[in-house]
Amino acid sequence: MVSLYPEYGLRIMYNDNNSIKEELEKLKTEIRTLQLRNKELEDLCMRDALTGLYNWRHFSSMLENEVARNIRQKHPISLIFFDVDNLKAHNDTHGHSGGNEVLKAVARCVAQSIRKHVDSAYRFGGDEFAIILPEIRSEMATEIARRIMDRLSESGFRDVSLSFGIAELEPGMDSNDLLNHADEAMYISKSESINKINVYK
């Protein structure tokens, strides 16, 4: 006799010598293994291969969800948007592998500076990064940005710096507004100085 489970592409076969219970237990184990593999693949699709941070594809949906949740709960939410200054010059001196080491160091500094399982960090593209900070106001976001900046400086990469833009969700804003404000604040930082943190006002 054959029992099919088409949703998992599995089937069990049993006869008089096989216990149905044993076959079902084997099937459950196979299903759990498949579920774990699917979860691993889904996570890989959301991650940047170089830094291990989430990628920009995951960023858009997460930002929209977090903004909607914090609006419902009337909680603050802040967004940090930043990029690496002078990375091209660093690449010219140390090669692209040297530039990759900088990006990986930035990712480590970010991971060490934010709340695990609460905040989320992203490599937005190239040398740009974003951090979503639920229930955080811009003043605390500024402290987090400064922490990242200090940690990168301590890591030994003296010829690169970071430019930060920070925006806090205000009444009437949506996720696109929050991103645009943080992006605008970052470009003001880049135009003013190196290792600059600017909060959108």
Image (cartoon, helix red, strand yellow):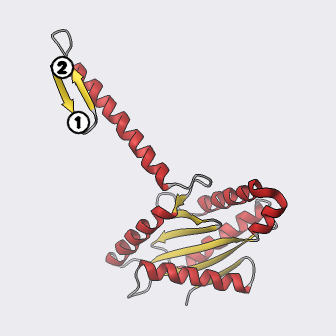
Task: Give x and y (percent) for residue 178.
Answer: 47, 80
Q: Which mark is residue 6?
A: 1
167 or 58, which lies in front? 58
Q: Is residue 25 above or below residue 111?
A: above
Q: Residue furthest bottom?
A: 201
Relative placement, left or right, of 93 versus 15 is: right
193 or 110, which lies in front? 193
- Say which quadrant the N terminus sits in: top left
Q: Is residue 119 visible?
A: no
For label 1, the crowd category at 10 Å Cα-Cα, with few meaning under 14, some 14 to 19 and many 20 or more, is few
Relative placement, left or right, of 168 versus 190 is: left
Residue in the image at 80% along x and 60% along y:
156
Q: Residue furthest top?
A: 17
Task: Give x and y (percent) for residue 31.
Answer: 31, 34
Task: Give x and y (percent) for residue 116.
Answer: 51, 58
Figure quadrant of residue 199: bottom right
Figure quadrant of residue 83: bottom right
Residue in the image at 60% along x and 79% along y:
165
Q: Residue furthest right?
A: 93
Total count of labels: 2
- Say which quadrant the C terminus sits in: bottom right
Residue in the image at 69% along x and 81% along y:
190
Q: Is residue 25 above or below residue 6?
A: above
- CA distance for labels 2 and 1: 18 Å
Q: Quickly name the residue at label 2.
A: 20
Between label 2 and label 1, give the one nearer the viewer.
Answer: 1
Secondary element type, mark 2: helix
Q: Identity of the amino acid at label 2?
A: Ile
Relative placement, left or right, of 8 versus 188 is: left
Q: Earlier in the sequence, mark 2 or mark 1?
A: 1
